Amino acid sequence: MKARGSYKIANRTRALDGLIDPLGRSERRVQRILESLRTEILEGGGGPNLRIRQVFRTPREIFRLELELPQLGYQRTTLLDRDALEELLAEDAIRAVVGMSSLES
């Protein structure tokens, strides 16, 4: 029998997110999203299944990344700012898969 008042917290890092400053939480979230995108782009092959378009120029540059994985019946749309897009494309493997032809204004 469990002792009264003792509960297991499944994910301690998420449980403490409320104590971390909002900028720290935001940065960790962006890193998780970018890592997920990297994985899906490398596994999906990029090319014709990936499109990056600029949606806004002002007040901030925003890009729309559309990734389609037909073998899974899956389409993902993600909005990224200029900094996040540059960080995603900083890796040579990603840049080779994406190719500059998929960038549209």
Image (cartoon, rainbow, N blue to C red):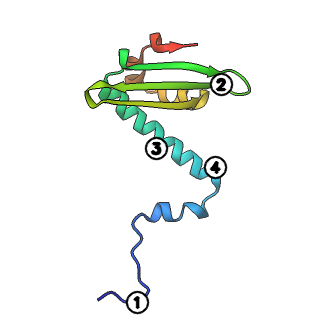
Instruction: Using the numbered discs, state the Cα–Cα distance from disc 3 to disc 4 in whole angstroms.
Output: 14 Å
Measuring from the top left, give residue 7's x and y in whole percent.
Answer: 41, 78
Which residue has dot 2 on it? 61
Q: Nearer the N terminus, badge 2 or badge 4?
A: 4
Between the residue at mark 1 and the residue at mark 3, the CA separation in whole angstroms equals 36 Å
Q: Which residue is mark 4?
A: 23
Query: Circle 1 is placed at which residue position?
Result: 4
What residue is shown at x 41% (from left), y 20% (from top)? Answer: 50
Choose the circle earlier in sequence order: 1 or 2: 1
User: Nearer the viewer's eye, disc 1 or disc 4?
Assistant: 1
Q: Which residue is mark 3?
A: 32
- Residue 101 image position (x, y, % from top left): 46, 10
Sequence-wise, which precedes: disc 1 or disc 4?
1
Distance CA(mark 1)–CA(mark 2): 53 Å
Q: Quadrant of the C terminus?
A: top right
Q: Is residue 65 left or right of residue 23?
A: left
Q: Position of residue 1 (x, y in %)?
A: 29, 89
Residue type pointed to by label 3: Arg
Task: Tell me how far mark 2 sits from mark 4, CA to CA.
Answer: 20 Å
